[in-house]
Amino acid sequence: RIDSIAPVPRVTLTRAEAAASLGISLESFEKFVQPGVRVIPLGAIRLVPVSELQRWATENAERAPR
């Protein structure tokens, strides 16, 4: 039965989930983030690997001014 399967970690997110995980709107995700990450096309859906979001966040992080 499907309800007896233990929860598993997500390795991909929808674009809306990816935006939410970064704390931004889908519009901001599409404009600022999506061009810099690889996505998995699956029909009309685009899945975003969690590893791509982590890479993007690390590469775009700046140190706060002192």
Image: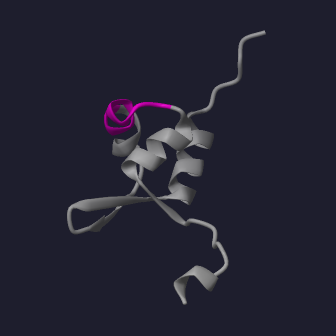
Vertical order, 23 against 55 (above or below) = above
What residue do we see at 39% from left, 45% from top?
16
Vertical order, 27 against 59 (above or below) = above
Quarter of the image where one finds residue 60: top right
In this view, which residue lies farthest toward the right? 66
Could you say which is closer to the camera, residue 6 or residue 41?
A: 6
Quadrant where the N terminus is found in the figure? bottom right
Vertical order, 1 against 8 (above or below) = below
Could you say which is closer to the camera, residue 13 or residue 30?
A: 13
Number of dots carrying numbers = 0
Query: Does the stretch in magenta take in 60?
Result: no
The x and y percentages for residue 33 are 41, 39
The x and y percentages for residue 66 are 78, 9
Q: Is residue 66 left or right of residue 26?
A: right
What residue do we see at 47% from left, 47% from top?
18
Quarter of the image where one finds residue 8: bottom right
The magenta-colored residue range is 24-31
Q: Is residue 25 left or right of residue 31?
A: right
The x and y percentages for residue 51 are 57, 58
In this view, which residue lies farthest toward the bottom? 1
Could you say which is closer to the camera, residue 54 or residue 19?
A: 19
Dominant SS type (magenta): helix
Q: Is residue 47 left or right of residue 65?
A: left
The x and y percentages for residue 2 are 53, 84
Q: Is residue 23 left or right of residue 63?
A: left
Query: Does the stretch in magenta take in 28?
Result: yes
What residue do we see at 59% from left, 49% from top?
54
What residue do we see at 36% from left, 36% from top?
26
